[in-house]
Image (cartoon, rainbow, N blue to C red):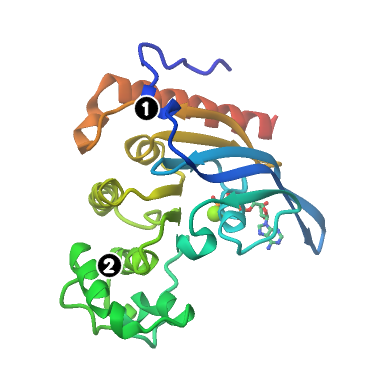
Amino acid sequence: MAVPAVSDVDHNPSLSDDRPLAIEIDGVGKVYQSSDGAVTALGSVNLDIRKGEFISLLGPSGCGKTTLLRIVAGLEEATTGHVHLHGRGLDGLGFVFQRDVLLNWLTIIDNVLLPIDFKNKKPKAYRDRARQLLATFGLEGFENKRPWELSGGMRQRAAICRALIDDPELLLMDEPFGALDALTRDELNVELQSLWQHSNKTALFVTHSISEAVFLSDRVVVVSDKPGRIVEVLDIDFARPRSLDIREEAVFGRYSRHLRGLLEQTDANHKG
Ligand SMILES: Nc1ncnc2c1ncn2[C@@H]1O[C@H](COP(=O)(O)OP(=O)(O)OP(=O)(O)O)[C@@H](O)[C@H]1O
Ligand SMILES: [Mg+2]
């Protein structure tokens, strides 16, 4: 099947700029040993990400997106290749997991302060920042509630605040909005864009949603499965800040169709 081309789209010159590298992913492969043999989760992945870029990983379930994110975060070891983090390295990294992993026995603010605790820093000095972050994400007044008293969207917001508490340079997000309703997801996409844009962070974002990837990203990295590898890296050329209305534009439709074609091809190869 032919993948529709992205025609009439100029490549964004700012993407071939000379911003310093933030993340170098160099020949990263991963083989898991499971009860029924070895599973090659990632083939050999190469990707350079520049400081301040917003990159999305888009691909089918099981193609190795979480694995790649966990290797970048140092939570998993690569079988081959390596990842180089510039700047503050692992210390400058915030992670939002695929499922919000708030601790039910802690208040929301204490959940947000958890990374500070882990790093043996003094939580007291960060309490005001935690309050500010929670307010930015619409959670003012919920600081002393427990996670089970909040909706899924609110818990996911709290998880994002936790990833941001130590002002990371790199924000790694694994389908943070996957479980949310469409309107909440839209709203959080806009909030995330704004936060990212104003803080000059580098973001690596995993999603199943084509429109979310196009809306948020400077570049969308399409990953195929068995084993996971990069099929294409697509530059997304829309000015910032972007409003949700860009989704109605013809160019947005062309990007989306192109990405859908790539995903369908991946799926067809897999089945065929
Ligand atoms: N700890 C593990 N042990 C064995 N196999 C694993 C382990 N973690 C992941 N895998 C396998 O590696 C492959 C990639 O998994 P991964 O979770 O990275 O995919 P994913 O792209 O994040 O999927 P999803 O979109 O469903 O979250 C899958 O085939 C999975 O079964
Ligand atoms: Mg995953």
Q: Quadrant of residue 256?
A: top left
Q: Which mark is residue 14?
A: 1
Evaluate whether residue 195 shows in this view.
yes
Q: Which image quadrant: the N terminus? A: top right
**Residue occupying the far bottom of the picture:** 105
Pair 2/1: label in front: 1
**Residue occupying the far left of the picture:** 141
Q: Position of residue 100 (x, y in %)?
A: 42, 67
Q: Position of residue 114 (x, y in %)?
A: 41, 79
Kind of residue sitting beneath label 2: Met
Disc 1 residue lies near ligand 1 with CB under 8 A: no
Q: Position of residue 129 (x, y in %)?
A: 25, 72
Residue beneath label 2, please?
154
* Above or below, 112 relative to 192: below
Q: How far apart in space, not on screen, are marks 2 and 1 (Cα)?
A: 35 Å
Residue in the image at 47% along x and 78% along y: 119
* Above or below, 244 relative to 264: below
Residue in the image at 76% along x and 53% along y: 79
Indicate which quadrant contains ligand 1.
Answer: bottom right
* Above or below, 175 relative to 46: below
Q: Quadrant of residue 231?
A: top right
Badge 1 density bin: few <14, some 14–19, many ≥20, Cα 10 Å: few
For residue 188, side relative to residue 53 (left or right): left
Nearest the eye: 200 or 4: 200
For residue 128, side relative to residue 236 (left or right): left
Badge 2 density bin: few <14, some 14–19, many ≥20, Cα 10 Å: some
For residue 241, side relative to residue 209 (left or right): left
For marks 2 and 1 on the same chain, the one whose residue lies earlier in the sequence: 1
Mark 2 secondary-structure assignment: helix
* Above or below, 186 relative to 259: below
